[in-house]
Image (cartoon, rainbow, N blue to C red):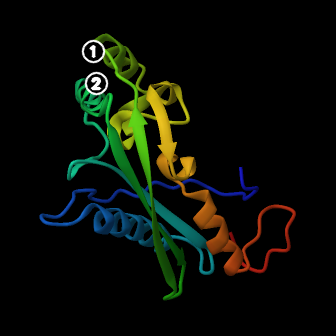
Amino acid sequence: MAGYEFEVDSPDIDETQLPGEQPEEFVIRMAAEKATAVAERAAAGTCVLGFDTAVVLQDRVYGKPDDVSQAAEMLLSLAGRTHTVITGYCLVIAGGVDEERGIDAARVTMRPVSRQQAEDYAATGEPLDKAGAYALQGRGGGFVAAVEGHRSTVIGLPLEHVVDLLTRRGIMPRGGEATGEV
């Protein structure tokens, strides 16, 4: 959407929240660990962005569901309520020591959802790799009544912040005058 060309690389890291770790600390740590893991195997000078998203309701952090049943239960626990979505991001330049981190949050109000609707949605597989077990940009968006904040933060890539970060670094989208590597 922002015009950048990129490759997706999913590192194999432990995404377990540490005891006592606050949701904001958790998503920033995960974003940094993901970016660092990819940067370690990338060519020097490569710009690597790591992201992590958590859904938070009453101090409970909802990550990705383990299976279809857990996905349906997560969706039912969020249904008819307002929760916070927190996305952390981290820019690492491979081969360097430079790193920049940030975070954004949005509030999401869900519509009421019946058990049958939750189970039918979970059976599609769409929510299985999504924090909170729904995809705003997909069929799960139909369960969302309102978003206060950036929709891209809920989707898991806060474009408004990331584009500013890349622009400050001289990294421009396709057709721009790039001074950094992507």
Q: Which residue is mark 2?
A: 72
Q: Residue furthest bottom?
A: 97
| Labels 1 & 2 near each other (Cβ < 8 A) | yes
The structure residue drawn at horizontal position 39% and vertical position 39%, both measured from the top left corner, is 129
Measured as percent of width and height from the top left, residue 3 is found at 76, 56
> Is 44 situated above or below 20?
below
Between the C-alphas of marks 1 and 2, the distance is: 8 Å
- Secondary structure under tag 2 reads helix
Residue 164 sits in quarter: bottom right
The tag on residue 115 is: 1
Judged by depth in the image, the label closer to the viewer, 1 or 2, is 1
The structure residue drawn at horizontal position 35% and vertical position 56%, both measured from the top left corner, is 12
Q: Amino acid at mark 2?
A: Ala
Residue 82 sits in quarter: top left
Q: Residues within 10 Å of mark 2 (few under 14, many from 20)?
A: many
Nearer to us in this view, 7 or 155: 155
Q: Residue furthest left?
A: 19
Mark 1 or mark 2: whose residue is earlier in sequence: 2
